[in-house]
Image (cartoon, coloured by chain):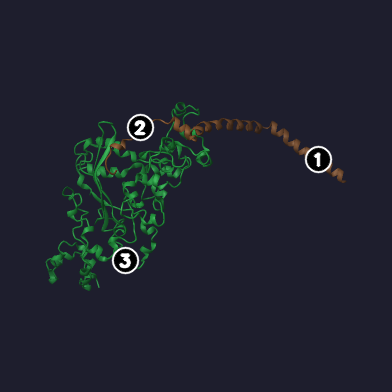
Chain colours: A green, B brown
Amino acid sequence: MAPLEPWEKVLVDGEAFPKTDHGELTCIECHLGTNVSDKAIAHEGMVVSPSAQPEIYCAECHEEETAAYPNSLHNTQAGYWTAINTRNTVEGAVPQGHEQLQEMFGNHCATCHTTCGECHVSQPENVGGGLFTGHVFETTPPMTRSCTACHGSRVGNEFLGKNEGYPGDVHFREARMNCVKCHEGADLHGMTEETASAEHRLNGAEDPTCIDCHEEVAAGDGIDMHERHGDTLSCQVCHSVTYTSCDGCHVAVSETSGNPFFETESTYMTFLIGRNPIQSEDRPYEYVPVRHIPSSPTSYEFYGDDLLPNFDALSTWVYATPHNIQRYTPQNASCEACHSNPDIFLTSDKVKAEELTANALVIVDVLPAPVDMILAAMPQPAEHSELVSNSCTACHTEGIRETPISPESHFGFLNESCSGCHKLP
Amino acid sequence: MNKKGFLGYLVVLGIFFLSSCAPAKTESPLATEETVVTESVATSAPEAGECLACHTDKQRLIDTAEPVVEAAESESKGVG
């Protein structure tokens, strides 16, 4: 997005704006200042961003949105603090360095906080600000000047197809859908159960979900892979393509300018399937695509020593929802494209040695068995349906009660994997 | 009633209606309110005018713009 010239940022459309609802108000009603032609006097006491105080300037007309918004992630940025606090807090110990972390947050993270106006009338300050369309308020934020202006380096580039060699999201390419087609206003304003007071963006039930629109998949569309893997793989495992990962972000304040800055060590393209680190009733998938985030134990070392003493409490390969959905992908081309393809799984050899502990829950220890092996697997005896225990290995490792002993190729398989191949008749 | 008489009746009736409206407009409190409304419009019009006069004038905004300060992002490296 090209930066706007200073005059462009504040140029009002004298034809269009006065005809809008907001144009019925005088400028001074929202921006204060004085009605004179001298710029300095006119701007004295001016409120540049009235919607930074929505309870004063927005609530009278937009009561529900204003009431909910203080708790929305766009306002609280709680996702950052959830991660920072988890890594800062060692169980049983008093958290240290919170003041330094707050200073760091204020310098580097808080600028992403969004006001009503930064989505509905101007570009976010974080990306330079400036009115969208001559001060005309937009019910739907313009995607590239608002949503992907902030969410650009990962989601925006994926969705719009800006990663060289990788197609944009089918919903954009084929249907020209914008962000709010899926991420509705109520979600963005924190007005739904899932988004009100969320601690991070993956809180609670998936919202939106793919089956909100693709209802036929949930109802049973006859596609074999949906039947077999619908509960165990997130949709993106089969339908997203290669996406961005980053390493080693460090933040500091410049000695020369006094301005905060960041530096990331590297950015690279990945497509890796990992175990779901936040598996729950809401997100039951065993496997999800995982993206490497640029957090490092020393990310905030400019502000103090050992500010993230419990760094390993969270993985650095995280649950990802790449926004580059395709109907056909390399991994869903055939069963073997996934089942016999170690390259697309986050195995321990792909994880840095110092991050193995943090990613223990995510690393895939045992790759999906080859399809031939699955098809040749003997079915379970019918009487197994009456077994109280579902611990296959309890009997089949030692051969208890004369049961067949698992072959060497099965070592490392988890109990819950067995019935994937050995079905009940 | 002949035609002339009927026309005369209509004229008298019309004068009556007109005369019954006219004094009320001058003497009722509404007349004062109308004046106030006129004054209020007169006050708010230049209010909008001064702000909009400048902010809808591209050349004036260019002429009065503050010098551009170098953005801090230039010191950052890599993808944010």
Vertical relation: A87 (above or below) A228: above
The first of marks 2 and 1 along the sequence is: 1
Horizontal and vertical percent position of residue B20: 74, 36
Q: Residues within 10 Å of mark 2 (few under 14, many from 20)?
A: few
Question: Which of the image's four quarters has the N terminus of chain A?
Answer: top left
Q: Is residue A221 visible?
A: yes
At label 3, the amino acid type is Glu
Label 3 SS: helix
Which secondary structure, mark 2?
loop
Q: In x, y percent, where is residue A229?
A: 29, 63
Q: Is residue A395 above or below residue A203?
A: below
**Which residue position holds label 2?**
B69
Q: Look at mark 3 in the image and give the residue it sits on.
A: A227
Residue at mark 3 to residue at mark 2: CA–CA distance:
58 Å
**Which image quadrant for residue A383?**
bottom left
Q: Is residue A124 above or below residue A357?
A: above
Q: Nearer the viewer, residue B3 or A153?
A: A153
Give the spatial CA distance, label 2 vs label 1: 77 Å
Indicate which label's residue lies in the foreground, 3 or 2.
2
According to the image, label 1 marks what residue?
B11
Q: Dividing the image into 4 quarters, which one contains the C terminus of chain A? A: bottom left
